[in-house]
Image (tube, helix red, strand yellow):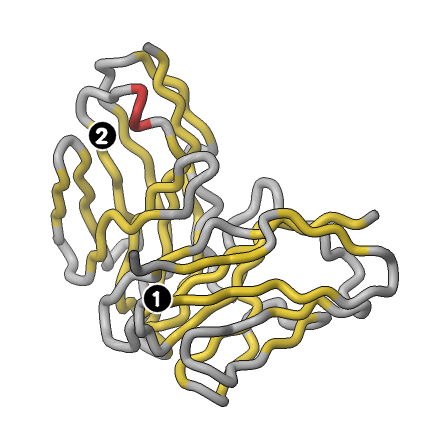
Amino acid sequence: ILNVEQSPQSLHVQEGDSTNFTCSFPSSNFYALHWYRWETAKSPEALFVMTLNGDEKKKGRISATLNTKEGYSYLYIKGSQPEDSATYLCAFSSLDNFNKFYFGSGTKLNVKP
Amino acid sequence: DGGITQSPKYLFRKEGQNVTLSCEQNLNHDAMYWYRQDPGQGLRLIYYSQIVNDFQKGDIAEGYSVSREKKESFPLTVTSAQKNPTAFYLCASSIVESNQPQHFGDGTRLSIL
């Protein structure tokens, strides 16, 4: 079982704050890194798929970077809003089987108005 | 609307009883997956299937069984051999091509009576 770690486990910020969190994954045999957003009582929703070292992706106020050589990805949220409150999951897939995802335990973000 | 439907939303199991969780998708996806989530842990893969009539064990398959008789359906049976079945179960599906995200249902919460 491959180890994927996310930090911090939870985060409380004020509306308007910018924040970021980390996903660490094995640096060998890398295929893709996926970010998901999971709101309470809803299903996880795909945010980004990242495949190349140095990749940067952006969706509105949310962006992500990827470093496959050292095995980490950062997710940034600029000017957090209460509707950003959710658990953010990352998932790693390897060259051995790109359809098999290994998930981190998530970072739970709470944005206070 | 296209999506993944899991039922029931809540399920209770008596000791020694088998129960089956339903997962149906109308996204025309070839691949389907079952995950288990426990508090403080990431999603762990139970079983997955990339084509009808074929499936593979994930990382925690013991005590579970699946079938894939139709493309749109991937039911999961939690058998009496699964000694700690209380958890949240998520079903997902995806296209079997590189770099495709998985799409998730809303989940089933299973509890022991």
* Residue A82 image point, x, y percent: 31, 20
Tell me the quadrant of the picture where the N terminus of chain B can be found.
Answer: bottom left
Q: Look at the numbered discs 1 and 2 and tell me whether their residues touch, using CB distance below 8 Å.
A: no
Q: State the separation of the CA atoms marked 1 and 2.
A: 24 Å
In front here: B56 or A97?
A: B56
Mark 2 residue type? Ile
Looking at the image, which residue sits at the far front? Answer: B1
Q: How many marks?
A: 2
Please indicate whether residue A81 sits to the left or right of residue B65 in the image.
Answer: left
At a point 51% along the width and 57% down the height, the residue shown is B6
Tag 2, which chain?
A
Q: Which residue is mark 2?
A: A77
Q: Which residue is mark 1?
A: A93
Quarter location, residue B104: bottom left
Task: Tell me: residue A93, above or below residue B12.
Answer: below
Mark 1 residue type? Ser
Q: Are marks 1 and 2 on the same chain?
A: yes
